[in-house]
Image: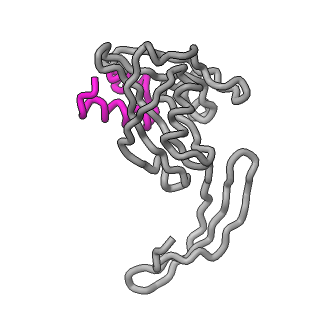
């Protein structure tokens, strides 16, 4: 942290039940040299990685569907979300994380991934950086049915869809997850499938 206009005055822990929620008091020096004091809550859930698996020959993608409580509490009638495979880094390198998560969630064992970008998904309140990847898959890479780890109670449904159908689901509102929209658009722009 090296912004001379920002001085962190105080950080108070509000919760560390699942992730960490802090209340941060900081000073912000304006261009006219006046200093404003701000208080913000900042949620730290760690960094994550996500991947769009695509098959350029079959013109398909692998997506997942699972229940997401926050979306349910904010108007998603079923709480089910269609997403790309994703997970928290858990102190892994982003590439190691997404290769592990891909096998756990989708059942595909991949060896090679391509990083396409890093992004802050909600920088006004959440510290998370999300590392986005694409990776090519085929049927020879399938080692099990996927679905996530029982210990993590994920209950993930693995979906193989034609790319055009998945891309159209953005316009219909069936896909509302930002990382998924971004990766499908990346695939479209770069003609991966």
Residue 127 position by quadrant = bottom right
Q: Nearer the viewer, residue 156 or 26?
A: 156
Residue 74 position by quadrant = top right
Which residue: 52% across, 34% down? Answer: 86
Q: Position of residue 171 (x, y in %)?
A: 33, 25
Which residue: 54% across, 27% down? Answer: 76
The image shows residue 99, relative to residue 78, as above or below, that is: below
Viewer can see residue 79:
no
Q: Is residue 114 left or right of residue 69?
A: left
Is residue 50 in the magenta section?
Answer: no
Which residue: 35% across, 14% down? Answer: 162
The image shows residue 160, relative to residue 91, as above or below, that is: above
Q: How is the image coloured?
A: one colour
Report the residue that reaches farthest toward the bottom: 33
Residue 163 position by quadrant = top left
Q: Position of residue 4 (x, y in %)?
A: 46, 79
Q: Position of residue 18 (x, y in %)?
A: 72, 45
Q: Position of residue 191 (x, y in %)?
A: 23, 28
Q: Nearer the viewer, residue 38 or 185?
A: 185
Q: Which residues are magenta?
A: 167-193
Q: Nearer the viewer, residue 35 or 13?
A: 13
Q: Nearer the viewer, residue 160 or 143?
A: 143
Which residue: 43% across, 26% down? Answer: 175
Mostly what secondary structure, the magenta segment?
A: helix
The image shows residue 16, relative to residue 160, as above or below, that is: below
The image shows residue 44, relative to residue 185, as above or below, that is: below
């Amino acid at each position: 942290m090296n912004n001379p206009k920002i001085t962190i005055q105080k950080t108070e822990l509000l919760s560390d039940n699942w992730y960490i929620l802090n209340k941060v008091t900081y000073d912000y020096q304006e261009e006219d040299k006046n200093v404003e004091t701000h208080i913000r809550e900042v949620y730290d859930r760690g960094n994550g990685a996500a991947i769009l698996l695509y098959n350029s020959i079959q013109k398909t993608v692998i997506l997942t569907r699972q229940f997401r409580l926050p979306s349910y509490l904010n108007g998603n009638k079923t709480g089910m979300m269609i997403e790309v495979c994703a997970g928290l880094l858990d102190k892994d390198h982003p590439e190691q994380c997404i290769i592990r998560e891909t096998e756990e969630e989708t059942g595909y064992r991949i060896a090679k991934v391509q990083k396409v970008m890093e992004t802050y998904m909600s920088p006004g309140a959440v510290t998370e950086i999300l590392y986005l990847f694409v990776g090519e898959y085929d049927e020879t890479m399938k080692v099990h049915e996927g679905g996530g780890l029982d210990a993590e109670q994920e209950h993930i449904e693995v979906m193989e869809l034609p790319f055009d159908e998945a891309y159209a689901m953005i316009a219909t509102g069936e896909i509302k997850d930002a990382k998924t929209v971004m990766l499908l658009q990346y695939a479209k722009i770069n003609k991966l499938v």
